[in-house]
Image: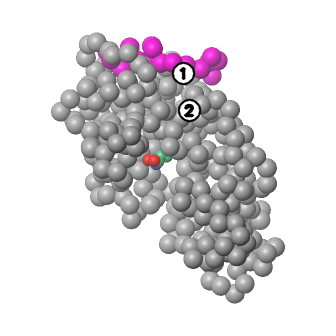
Amino acid sequence: MASGYRGRFAPSPTGPLHAGSLVAALASWLDARAQDGRWLVRIEDVDTPRCVPGADRFILQQLAACGLVSDEPVSWQSTRSDFYQAALDRLIACGLAYPCGCSRKDIEAALQASGLARERHHAAVYPGTCRPERGGLAGRAPRAWRLRVAPGVQQWTDRRLGPQQQNVETEVGDFVLRRADGLWAYQLAVVVDDAAQGITHVVRGEDLADNTPRQIRLQLALELPAPLYLHTPLVLGDNGEKLSKQNGAQALDLSDPLAALQAAAQALGLPKAAGNLPDALASWTRAWPWRLAERL
Ligand code: GLU
């Protein structure tokens, strides 16, 4: 019996799945199954320079080998530009998005001049130079589009991490919706698509937790419903760093999908499962620790 739960796994096709991304895939699948919900796969291929040709198909094969198959047709963000443009147009019409003419150098210079060399994850906090009330583009060509972030601390509760908060204005600044190279920013695409697909529950790796308050701000600005969030533990490599494609994580070995899933399940604190792949998935669904108290 299907409930109202709708979850998703949203890989970027920048390379094959590795042990870390399988944890997020398995967790989102188990959470959906534990809630009798639907599980969707969405290929997040908006950052085209980082996408590897064929990686999308390969990821889908890897997931299928692990018994994880989307309940609805897979969607590709690269086909959805019109929807992202419509969302940006709406924000512009409400005065919530503005064009920015700053290069990275301009931003660094402005931060230094103000004595506020603020940094977060090696990215400068945008100082609001091009806000319309501060003079706007001042004759410069528009490069990116940014969200005007309202003041105040954004609070939210993660189903695993508990209460969280971030002052998006001072810790991140007005963030980019459409990049200077014309590509759509992850934040805008993910929020538009989660809403368009009716996603009620987002389950993804803890490395993305820090994006959640920005996404909530965008949901509020676009008057879209906010899903519930659960961020899963990260898998660390032998060097103690997060496993990622950037630091050379190995592609999953498809010759033994059950072994790969056992490792992912272990990272989620689930017991080793006996039997074949469907048995293992069923037993982890029963043991799923983040089952929701209320049925949807
Ligand atoms: N596409 C993102 C990634 O692969 C995940 C986005 C999300 O789950 O919100 O890191």
Q: Choose between 232 and 217: the one closer to the eye.
A: 232
State the extent of the magenta-drawn residues as a range. Answer: 279-296
Q: In the rendered view, would you say 73 is above or below 190?
A: above
Q: Quadrant of residue 150?
A: bottom right
> Where does the image place residue 92, in percent across and percent down from the top left?
71, 66
Q: In the rendered view, would you say 145 is above or below 263?
A: below
Classify mark 1 as within 8 Å of ligand 1 or not, answering yes or no.
no
- Is 188 a magenta residue? no
Q: Residue at x 61, y 60 (%)?
A: 119
Contact? badges 1 and 2 (CB < 8 Å): yes
Looking at the picture, which amino acid does disc 2 mark?
A: Leu
Classify mark 2 as within 8 Å of ligand 1 or not, answering yes or no.
no
Q: Residue at x 25, y 29 (%)?
A: 257
Horizontal side, residue 60 vs residue 11: left or right = left
The residue tagged 2 is 230
Circle number at residue 290: 1
Q: Choose between 122 and 80: the one closer to the eye.
A: 122
> Where does the image place residue 111, in percent across and percent down from the top left?
67, 71
Q: Choose between 133 and 282: the one closer to the eye.
A: 133
> Where does the image place residue 129, in percent across and percent down from the top left?
71, 73
